[in-house]
Image (tube, grey):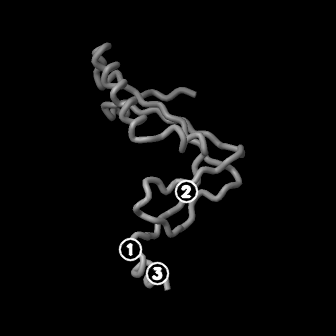
Amino acid sequence: MRSTLLHRHPELEITISRTIEAARVEEISKAKVNEWYDEFEKTISKYQTTVENMYNMDETGFSIGCIKAAKAVVNKNLETTRQARPGRQGWLSEIECVRADRNTDIKKSV
């Protein structure tokens, strides 16, 4: 049955559906990402920063009590396949830091 539906509707495809916080959907776009990279390049140039002095620190969260992923049939011609999840829930956070030159000889302290 699945292949018949997809065969009759070539605009559909099976994908993994993931929930995302509503605020993240509103703040992410190609224009916003390009704007961030433009500002990043200007900052590197202005301060003449070298790769051994560049670090990326990021935080990610894991929602507690929500389904993270499920298979879904979506229209592949749509610009976005994200669905916002309203409200608040519990989160577990993880932080990581990586140096741009990939040097793994970084001392860790807690």
Q: Which x, y percent locates residue 90?
A: 71, 44
Pointer 1 residue? 10
Question: Percent from the top left, x then y, of residue 2?
Answer: 48, 81
Is 38 placed above or below 19 here? above
**CA distance separating discs 2 and 3:** 22 Å
Q: Please tell me which residue is depicted at 31% across the width and 25% down the height of the picture.
A: 41
With 28 as the anchor, is 48 left or right in this view?
A: left
Neighbour class for label 2 at 10 Å: few (<14), some, many (≥20)? some
Q: Which residue lies furthest to the top in this view?
A: 47
The residue that label 3 is drawn on is 5
Q: How far apart are marks 3 and 1 (CA)?
A: 9 Å
Q: In front: 109, or 85?
A: 85
Q: What residue type is labelled 1?
A: Pro
Q: Are marks 1 and 2 in contact (CB under 8 Å)?
A: no
Q: Earlier in the sequence, mark 3 or mark 1?
A: 3
Pointer 2 with pointer 3, Cβ within 8 A:
no
Query: If the image is split into quadrants, where does the C terminus sit?
Result: top right
**SS at mark 1 in the image:** loop
Dot 3: few (<14), some (14–19), or many (≥20) neighbours within 10 Å? few
- Tag 3–tag 1 contact (CB < 8 Å): no
Which residue is labeled 2 in the image?
18
Left or right: residue 23 compared with residue 87: left
Which residue is rendered at x = 69% and y = 50% of the image?
64
Quadrant in which residue 49 is drawn? top left
Instruction: Name the residue: 53% across, 61% down.
Output: 17
Task: Give the mark nearest the N terminus, 1 or 2.
Answer: 1
Provide the secondary structure element on which disc 2 rests: strand
Residue 78 is situated, as x and y percent measured from the top left of the image, at 44, 58
Give the x, y percent position of residue 85. 64, 50
Q: Which amino acid does label 3 sit on?
A: Leu
- Category of crowding for the residue at label 1, using alpha-carbon neighbours closer than 10 angstroms: few (below 14), some (14–19), many (at least 20): few
